[in-house]
Amino acid sequence: GGARYKDPRQPLNRRIEDLLARMTLAEKIGQMSQIERENATADVVRGYFVGSVLSGGGSVPAPQAPAEAWVEMVNEMQRAAMSTRLGIPMLYGIDAVHGHGNVYKATVFPHNVGLGCTRDPELVKKIGAATALEVRATGIPYVFAPCVAVCRDPRWGRCYESYSEDPRVVQQMTSSIIPGLQGEIPANGRRGAPFVAGQRNVAACSKHYVGDGGTTRGINENNTAASFHELLGVHMPPYYSAVIQGVSTVMVSFSSWNGVKMHANHFLVTDFLKNRLRFRGFVISDWRGLDKMTSPEHDDYITSVKLGILAAIDMVMIPYTYTEFIDDLTALVRNGTIPMSRIDDAVRRILRVKFTMGLFEDPYGDPSLAGELGKPEHRELAREAVRRSLVLLKNGKPGQKPLLPLPKKAGRILVAGSHADNLGYQCGGWTITWQGLGGNNLTAGTTILNGIKRAVQDHGTEVVYSESPDAGFVQRNKGRFDYAVVVVGEPPYAESFGDNLNLTIPEPGPSVIRVVCGGGIRCAVVLVSGRPLAVEPYVGAVDALVAAWLPGTEGEGVSDVLFGDYGFTGKLARTWFRSVEQLPMNVGDARYDPLFPFGFGLGLETQ
Ligand SMILES: OC[C@@H]1[C@@H](O)[C@H](O)[C@@H](O)c2nc(CNc3ccccc3)cn21
């Protein structure tokens, strides 16, 4: 129709005001509602004027669904949204936090804990751009990334989603990944306003506002006790960077600041983020974030809706109980508890993002991008990121020559450990499923073992693989192996399932290290983990120690540096503690006695 809001030549604010003036309360509240895809039938999307749909962790149209199936699913929901009276397109969001991890055969990049060690903003920007293309390949225009948490305690189950304990490193990566995902703001463009360059970019979401990485003992969703000065100095800096880079959305944290739930924090969401930092995009809640404002959850829900919407959350991630949310918010507006001006502010912000990103002009997924999913160039980029993320912590025992780089030409080598041949373990959480998986059938990729095999295959070297060799095997064979590579670490986890107060290497890791490295074979230990673990008891026994973090699908990046095709350049972005009793302990603390300090990382003497 000839309505002004449908004319892309009209100024942005004219389009927003024209559309807003036409909207009923039901249509406005519908825009503020984000529901889970499994509820998003055409009737629900249309009937409730749903403004946004999400895939929660692992929520897919079908197991191993190809890009085409994703595009068809999103477009079917979109056709329903476009068929409403005003034809406002819905916005589909998903967690693409290390590449498009939920999607079968997508490129899975290293998790942020590893990217922080690269100290390479250009690399991280390219990862953003590649991730945007893979997300668009599935018809999705919005990602709940980057996580810009400043993890201050590795006992936190989400520490691997944080680039660093140092806010400046997090700022550096934030300022890179956002223009990678959303596209660069043109030189004459408005900084600080939401920006998405076009249909090969996606709207981003910096999360979780604010202080998610500062909770007591790293307990997920718990309380961050900090002065305002400390909150501003440690946890807020990435949000300055995100707003300047034109981030389109900000997601509120489940956690609390000094006992006040972030989802109810008017001072930080409205006074600070919206008014002081002048954030102009929309603020989105986390999953059932309003229900979780109380304990027990969902206790006096209508009050939680009131507090959350007045704090100034604009869009509510209400995966299942959207009718209750809509009814309660409608009642609160009708009885004057919530002024229409607050609703209009929320809807303006949502429409500003949708207009700016071109969603009205291009509401549907582009099937021609399907080839971007998991394409070789992206896997090569991921492999480079793996190389750059690895940190060499030890190389050679006192008085002995360094073990690394490993010679490709060796009679026989042993590869051992639970994480040597396990694609799921090396990807970690938020991969195919919410919590991640074990095994090698979850998606397409290369294990560390297969990377080692490929590296030595033309050199007449025999590779013997034993996940958990026993002492007898090692004793009988120790003279036969030139060296061993032992790959151990943590199983995948996400959110509270990763909270851990002891941070020991899970068995059978330590046993394999003792049996192999203590059995007389020179050994390089590669640790696959979402954070530093308690390794002091083993450091003396090993000849080399490498932190590989959660490298993702491109395991050849690990063998590339083990064999010296590339040097080790990674530098710790997190302090490596001696014992958990020291925690929290971060660079800059008065009391600082690490096993390996922030910024540590050896090179190869030959590099
Ligand atoms: O997946 C959506 C959000 C995500 O963006 C947030 O970072 C994270 O805090 C978050 N947690 C959940 C809860 N996910 C969940 C998945 C399956 C069953 C139950 C809960 C959803 N989300």
Image (tube, grey):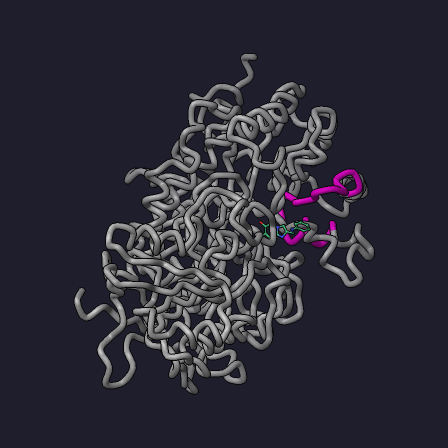
Horizontal and vertical percent position of residue 436:
57, 52
Horizontal and vertical percent position of residue 84:
67, 21
Magenta part of the chain: 305-324
Evaluate whether residue 239 shows in this view.
no
The one of 460 and 271 positioned closer to us in this rendering = 460
Quarter of the figure with the C terminus: bottom left
Number of marks in picture: 0
Left or right, residue 371 beside residue 259: left
The one of 429 and 45 positioned closer to us in this rendering = 429
Evaluate whether residue 17 shows in this view.
yes
The image shows residue 155, relative to residue 70, as above or below, that is: below
Q: Residue furthest front?
A: 476
The one of 445 and 513 positioned closer to us in this rendering = 513
The image shows residue 127, relative to residue 164, as above or below, that is: above
Left or right, residue 571 beside residue 512: left
Tell me what residue is drawn at x 80 percent, y 62 percent: 296
Tell me what residue is drawn at x 34 percent, y 56 percent: 452
The reply to whether the magenta stretch includes residue 311 is yes
The image shows residue 568, relative to residue 36, as above or below, that is: below
Q: Residue furthest left?
A: 606
Left or right, residue 339 beside residue 122: right
Quarter of the figure with the N terminus: top right
Tell me what residue is drawn at x 51 percent, y 43 percent: 443
Horizontal and vertical percent position of residue 123:
31, 50
Q: Residue furthest top?
A: 1
In the rendered image, which quarter is residue 261 located in? bottom right
Tell me what residue is drawn at x 46 percent, y 33 percent: 136
The reply to whether the magenta stretch includes residue 591 is no
In the rendered image, which quarter is residue 117 located in? bottom left
Horizontal and vertical percent position of residue 600:
32, 73
